[in-house]
Amino acid sequence: MPNKKIQTVIFKNKSKYVGEFKNNYKHGQGICTYTDGRKYSGEYKNDNPHGKGTYTYANKGKYVGTFKDGQFSGQGSFTFPNGDKYIGKWKNGKTNGQGTFVYAQTIDIYAKRRKYVGEWKSNNMNGKGIETFHDGTKYVGEFKNGKFNVRVLTLTNKVVRVFTQIRVMLNMLEDGRMVCKVVRVLTRL
């Protein structure tokens, strides 16, 4: 088995890699710094991030966790430039499995959803989950493709109704309170 070598390589595009090589591939521990401000520090296998590592984007987004064949895979956290953060499972570069998304406090009405804990599939809230809003109001139930698929809706600790599906309008008032209105009942249990 050939030995791993630590080398410094500057590529044609001026990116720089300092780390271990095996059979002329990045393999083992290494740091790659790109000219556009991106940086990866961690384990490599056959020229790809593989194992534990940290990938920092030029816009200050940052992933810390495990990689498989160059993609986020397994357990990891991603902090977005605006302060939003996802902590949980990844598969093929996408959120997949159990995870928590904490929203940064901004003026965006959707960011007022303070926290989601539950199941994910292909970067969408999908399956059982709990979304807690900034005022403590909670939605407990099913999500499908990132949207409410209401089964149990809990508002300020009171169960409102149980449905297989309903269309819900949530309105934020200026004082921060939320008003929930059932627009159309599709199927009632």
Image (cartoon, rainbow, N blue to C red):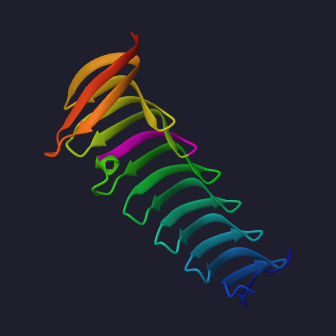
Above-or-below relation of 137 to 72: above
SS majority, magenta: strand
Above-or-below relation of 79 to 23: above
Q: Position of residue 171 (x, y in %)?
A: 25, 37
Q: Residue at point 30% right, 22% down?
A: 182
| 177 within the magenta span | no
Quarter of the image for residue 161 reads top left
Q: Quadrant of the C terminus?
A: top left
Q: Quadrant of the N terminus?
A: bottom right
Q: Residue furthest left?
A: 175
Q: Position of residue 154 (x, y in %)?
A: 26, 27
Q: Position of residue 18 (x, y in %)?
A: 66, 85
Residues 175 and 15: in front is: 175
Q: Residue at point 31% right, 53% down?
A: 108
Region rendered in magenta: 113-122
Residues 105 and 183: in front is: 183
Q: Residue at point 76% right, 79% down?
A: 21
Q: Position of residue 158 (x, y in %)?
A: 20, 25
Q: Residue at point 54% right, 46% down?
A: 123
Residues 89 and 136: in front is: 136
